[in-house]
Amino acid sequence: MNQVNLQPGQKIKIGLNEGKVMYSSQVQDVSRDGTLLVDTPVYRGHLVPIRVDSIVQVIYFTKQGLFIFYAKVLNRFSGSIPLLELMPISGVERLQRRKYFRLEKLIPFTYKIVGEDEEYRGMIQDISGGGLRCQVDKKLEVGTQIECNFILDEEVRVIGKVVRYEEGLEKGYEIGVCYVDIDEKMREKIIRYIFEEQRKIRQKGIE
């Protein structure tokens, strides 16, 4: 496990209840003893009530990937910028693709086999920061690389590799796609989209 290495301005996610609820935040300061001052998350115009002494997850992105560590809330500060003081209590672990949060949602997409010009249509069944599960009409062998295009909050283009396929469906094939060429900023946007959609789903359940 690596040590926490965050800088002021770094955007982070704060996870409560073992990551079941995620909120956006940002690092404001890092002290010599390793404690962090971060923005208190805001949801629907209200500060998220995070108790002193509670344990939270902190997730952040770098060019090297997605990382997570646990921290204890030492203090809360009010003012023009409400802050939380966090003390890391674990080392940093890199989240593997299998640990990426996954969202089940039907999203139309188009794809081309890399090196070919013909475009096909399919339907994404679920999406994560590591890949896609899709339904397609064309049989795609494991190892085939495809260029996928779809719309979330904006247009997304990624190159993925088919890592499994399942036939015998009522219509077409189900394939698993692992990203092999994706800009890390785009991966972060996908994960943020997933967090936001999951938050909307939870809120509908509450209402």
Image (cartoon, grey):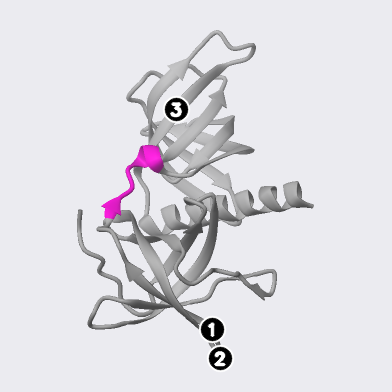
Of labels 3 and 2, the one closer to you:
2
- Residue 101 coordinates in the image, percent (x, y): 48, 44
Helix, strand or loop for disc 2: loop
Q: Which mark is residue 79?
A: 2
Could you tell me the amino acid type at mark 3?
Answer: Gly
Does the CB distance between marks 2 and 1 fall below 8 Å?
yes
Q: Is residue 131 magenta?
A: no
**What is the crowding at mark 3: few (fewer than 14 residues within 10 Å), some, or many (at least 20)?**
many
Compared with 48, 15 (above or below) is above
**What is the crowding at mark 2: few (fewer than 14 residues within 10 Å), some, or many (at least 20)?**
few
Is 54 on the left-hand or right-hand side of 105?
left
Tag 2 or tag 3, which sits nearer the N-term? 2
Could you tell me the amino acid type at mark 1?
Answer: Pro
**Farthest bottom residue?**
80
Residue to which mark 1 is pinned: 82
Residue to which mark 3 is pinned: 176
**Alpha carbon separation for disc pair 3 and 2:** 48 Å
Q: Nearer the viewer, residue 142 or 192?
A: 192
Helix, strand or loop for disc 3: strand
Could you tell me the amino acid type at mark 2?
Answer: Gly
Compared with 169, 140 (above or below) is below
Helix, strand or loop for disc 1: loop
Q: Which residues are magenta?
A: 93-99
What residue is rendered at 51% in x and 11% in y? Answer: 167
Is 196 on the left-hand or right-hand side of 149?
right
Q: Nearer the viewer, residue 178 or 202?
A: 202
Q: Is residue 95 magenta?
A: yes
What residue is rendered at 28% in x and 59% in y? Answer: 90
Q: Quadrant of residue 178?
A: top left
**Alpha carbon separation for disc pair 1 and 3:** 43 Å
Compared with 207, 132 (above or below) is above
